[in-house]
Amino acid sequence: MPAAMKKWFDSLDTDETFAPKNPDLFKRATASIVCSIVNFNDVKEKDALCKFCDIFKEEFHIDEETAQKLFKDSTYVQENLEKNVHTIREELEGDEYKLMEYMKMLNKFIIVDHCKEEDYCIFEELKTKLFG
């Protein structure tokens, strides 16, 4: 997991670009979206991934079973994409500038992660749902 991703995730609740109404809810939805897009199975820095997963579990008080679903079962995350999109739109108040900045950051992570085509399809679906 690139350090830039962790830094961005950690700053979501204080980043004035986004200024979500409920920072915890926004971060939780974002983490779930990131988990669905970033190909964790191919991460070379397993220690960094474990640290991210631990921080995610601790910060949101997620039990081990749910965490396993989030980080290993892409269908679980896919099923929640609609809910997460709704949360992101609501938290960013449908502001197109904020939504574009959000998508721009996610796209950077996809590029850094060298995602596969199926991972990018999730990004495209997210984009369609956010702006559709």
Image: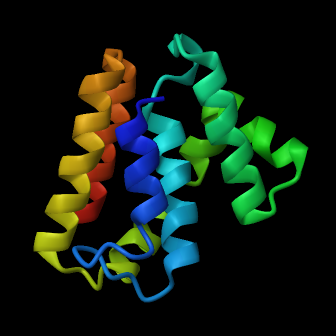
Residue 70 visible from this viewpoint: no
Q: Is residue 103 left or right of residue 53?
A: left
Residue 110: which quarter of the image?
Answer: top left
- Residue visible at 35% across and 15% down? 116
Position of 35 with respect to 55 (left or right) is left
User: Number of marks in the image?
Assistant: 0
User: Residue 88 appears at what percent x and percent y?
Assistant: 39, 70
Q: Residue furthest left?
A: 97
Q: Is residue 48 in view?
A: yes
Residue pictured at 18% horizontal, 80% vertical: 95
Q: Residue at x 79, y 36 (%)?
A: 68
The spot of residue 94 in percent (x, y) is 24, 80
Question: Which quarter of the picture shows residue 58?
Answer: bottom right
Q: In this view of the protein, which residue sits in the foreground, 56 or 80?
A: 56
Colouring: rainbow
* Residue 75: percent from left, percent from top: 63, 35
Q: Position of residue 62 (x, y in %)?
A: 81, 57
Depth check: give the residue in front, 108 or 70. Answer: 108
Q: Residue at x 42, y 36 (%)?
A: 3
Name the image quarter holding the C terminus: bottom left
Residue 11 versus residue 92 in the image, above or below = above
- Left or right side of 39 for 60: right
124 or 6, which lies in front? 6
**Figure check: 100 above or below 126:** below
Q: Measured along the vertical axis of the image, is residue 57 above or below residue 48?
A: below
